[in-house]
Image (tube, helix red, strand yellow):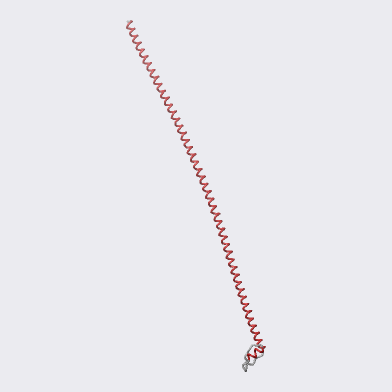
Amino acid sequence: KIEEEEAEMAAKQAQLAEQVEELRKAAEEKEAAKKAEEEQARIAAEEEQDAIELAAEEAKAAAEAKAAADAAAKAKLERALKAEAAEKAEMKRVAAEAEAKAEYLKKQEDEKAAAAAAEEKLKEVAAREAAVQAAAREAAEAKAAEAKAKAAADEEARLKEEEAKKPKVDDSDGKGSLRSLLLGGKWTPKN
């Protein structure tokens, strides 16, 4: 009986030991599962942290790229504005040059026109002077002709008067010319 009890107790002990072993195994498995879960959680946390850091780096890179693009766009705009200002300045300079040239040409044209007008005036004055001189010449010629005609008329009148004063030479015998020479006068036939 004692042996049976011992055997029963040994069986119970063995059963208890088995149960303890099972409980220990279960506890170990549970611990291992817990560790595995914690490891998975740690890995997941690390991956999440890595993902956050990567996203932050990507965001930073994108922000830097955007800042660089903005800076490039700003620089390009500034260059375009400078080029436009330079072009406007050049256009203004060219316009000023053209205006100055036009003013110069207009001045030259005005001077040419004034010179032409002065020349025309001089021609007109010269023509008037020539007309006056021609009129004066014509008047002088007319006066000279009149004086000549008067002198000729005076001479003719004087000759007629002298002739009238001379005695009439008798030419009845045809010797009137001889008588005229002797008398110092011109021979005139007796009427």
190 left or right of 99?
right
Judging depth in this view, the residue of 162 and 121 nearest the camera is: 162
Q: Quadrant of the C terminus?
A: bottom right
Return the x and y of residue 33 as percentages of the image width and height. Answer: 39, 21
Q: How many marks?
A: 0
Residue extending farthest top: 2
* Residue 19, quarter of picture: top left
Return the x and y of residue 152 as percentages of the image width and height. Answer: 63, 82
Judging depth in this view, the residue of 122 and 65 nearest the camera is: 122
* Residue 143, quarter of picture: bottom right
Name above or below for residue 26 compared with residue 81. above
Name above or below for residue 58 compared with residue 128. above
Return the x and y of residue 140 as percentages of the image width and height. Answer: 62, 75
Q: Quadrant of the N terminus?
A: top left
191 left or right of 10?
right
Judging depth in this view, the residue of 141 and 111 nearest the camera is: 141
Name above or below for residue 9 compared with residue 180. above
Judging depth in this view, the residue of 133 and 45 nearest the camera is: 133
* Residue 101, quarter of picture: bottom right
Name above or below for residue 187 compared with residue 99. below
